[in-house]
Amino acid sequence: MRIVAAIGGNALLQRGEHPDAAVQSKHVHQAARSLAELVEAGHELVITHGNGPQVGLLAAESEADPALSAPYPLDVLGAQTQGMIGTLLARELMGRLPGRAVAAVLTHTEVDPHDPAFQRPDKFIGGALDEAQARRMAAEHGWTTAKDGTRLRRTVPSPRPVAVTEVPALRTLLAAGTVVIAAGGGGVPVTRDTVTGLVHGVEAVVDKDRTAALLAEQLDADALLILTDVTHVFTGFGTSRPRPLLTATPAGLRALDLPDGSMRPKAEAAASFAERTGGLAAIGPLDNALGILLGATGTTVLPADVPTPRPGHGEPVLFGKEF
């Protein structure tokens, strides 16, 4: 099978952790074991990853750097995070898959310059801010912020991906047996002039899960695995009785009341891929990618009208009701 596996940025740098390189290297080390198992089982693998915490950190550093006359734009900072996380993943996978080619590819994602998202910044980046910090950054740098749970975080535009530019090159690498790391952070957001063909970066961060679904479709992938720091999508999230969702239809998944800044984009990406391709889409724990593929854990999104039981799960649960 050809698999696109998407790793959340928060899975590589979890809430409350110091954003040190050593901390992220530890999480990448753990993720690489799970990802390598997919390759060892005989599957083609494309890995993409989030960058919300990382690009937010770089943006804050750039805003505060007195040596700069202006901070670096988000598209350039996104490229920096692709290189940083890409090399950590590549080195770990090279060590776990000796003799197997691994390539981290700087990837661009085309967006519509007229996307209304540019007027409605809602993508969280960076760490938590207190009220005073949020007011200061709004006054000094024009930042917009919103509550992510109980915390304030910076929000930036997140236009929908239209195309992943490097798909032909990625196909060539896959045909040669290469494990590919691509479209990190949703890809570097760019627009293309329809007359001149010139490509320009834009001040935005594309949602990683949306790009992963598009990339999986463009690469004719058989499966999209969205790997995160929880075991399942849960019904009743935030209540005293959350319940793991084992299988779901795309429409049913979209009907759930899921957090906009975290699980909802993952659910939408999985639903979109399942609908548009008929392929397997699943959301589950980063440390057991092969288990998600085999049906032993995670939430599987099925394009059929009625979900069927998955191996290892017993009876399926759909939207909090047992069938």
Image (cartoon, rainbow, N blue to C red):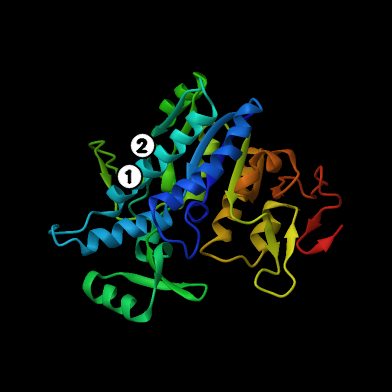
- The Cα atoms of the two marked residues, 2 and 1, are separated by 7 Å
Label 1 secondary element: helix
Label 2 secondary element: loop
Q: Amino acid at mark 1?
A: Ala
Where is residue 288 shown, x and y percent of the image?
65, 44
Closer to the camera in the image, 141 or 87 = 87
Badge 1 is on which residue?
79
Q: Is residue 210 visible?
A: no
Q: Residue at x 51, y 51 (%)?
A: 8
Q: Is residue 178 above or below residue 152?
A: above
Closer to the camera in the image, 117 or 230 = 230
Q: Which mark is residue 106?
A: 2
Q: Is residue 174 above or below residue 109?
A: above
Which class describes the residues within 10 Å of circle 2: few (<14), some (14-19), or many (20+)? some
Asked if marks 2 and 1 touch (Cβ < 8 Å), the reply is yes
Q: Amino acid at mark 2?
A: Leu
